[in-house]
C-alpha cells in the first residue's frame, strides 16, 4: 500500500503543477479541502476510488496512471 500512496502523491503533485493549479484549486473542483489534497501529496492518506476517478478526469489520465509509480515517458499523459 505504501508504494501506491507514494505513486499517487508523486503523480498528483506533478499533474497539478503542470496545470499551474494550487492545492486549493484542485480541492475546490473536488469539493474537498486543500488540507486533504496536501495529505494526499505527502502520502499521508489516499483519496477513495471515486475521488481518484474524478482526479483522473480532471487531468485527462487514467486511474492506472495515478497509481503507477514509473511511466515510460514522464511527459506522456495517458489519455482515457
Image (spheres, rainbow, N blue to C red):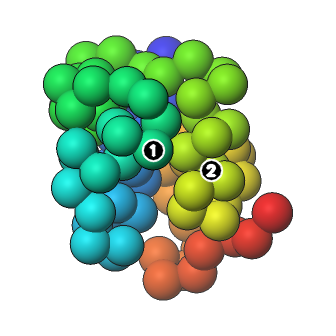
- Where is residue 59? Give x, y as percent: 55, 62
What is the quadrant of the C terminus in the image? bottom right
Q: Nearer the viewer, residue 76 or 73?
A: 76
- Where is residue 22? Give x, y as percent: 21, 55
Q: CA distance from mark 2 to mark 1?
A: 12 Å
Judged left or right of residue 64, residue 24 is left
Q: Nearer the viewer, residue 41 or 21?
A: 21
Q: How many marks?
A: 2
Residue in the picture at 66% in, 61% down? 61
User: Which numbered dot is residue 29?
Assistant: 1
Badge 1 element? helix
Going from N to C along the chain, the mark reached first, 2 or 1, is 1
The relative height of residue 35 versus residue 64 in the rendered view (above or below) is above
Task: Find residue 24 and report its image quarter.
Answer: top left
Query: Does any portion of residue 65 appear in the rendered image?
Result: no
Read off the residue under disc 2. 56
The relative height of residue 8 versus residue 72 in the rendered view (above or below) is above
Amino acid at each position: 500500500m505504501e508504494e501506491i500512496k507514494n505513486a499517487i502523491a508523486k503523480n498528483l503533485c506533478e499533474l497539478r503543477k503542470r496545470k499551474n493549479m494550487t492545492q486549493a484549486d484542485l480541492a475546490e473542483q473536488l469539493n474537498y479541502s486543500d488540507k486533504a489534497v496536501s495529505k494526499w501529496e505527502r502520502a499521508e492518506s489516499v483519496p477513495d476510488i471515486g475521488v481518484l476517478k474524478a482526479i483522473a478526469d480532471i487531468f485527462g489520465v487514467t486511474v492506472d496512471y495515478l497509481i503507477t509509480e514509473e511511466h515510460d515517458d514522464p511527459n506522456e499523459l495517458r489519455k482515457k
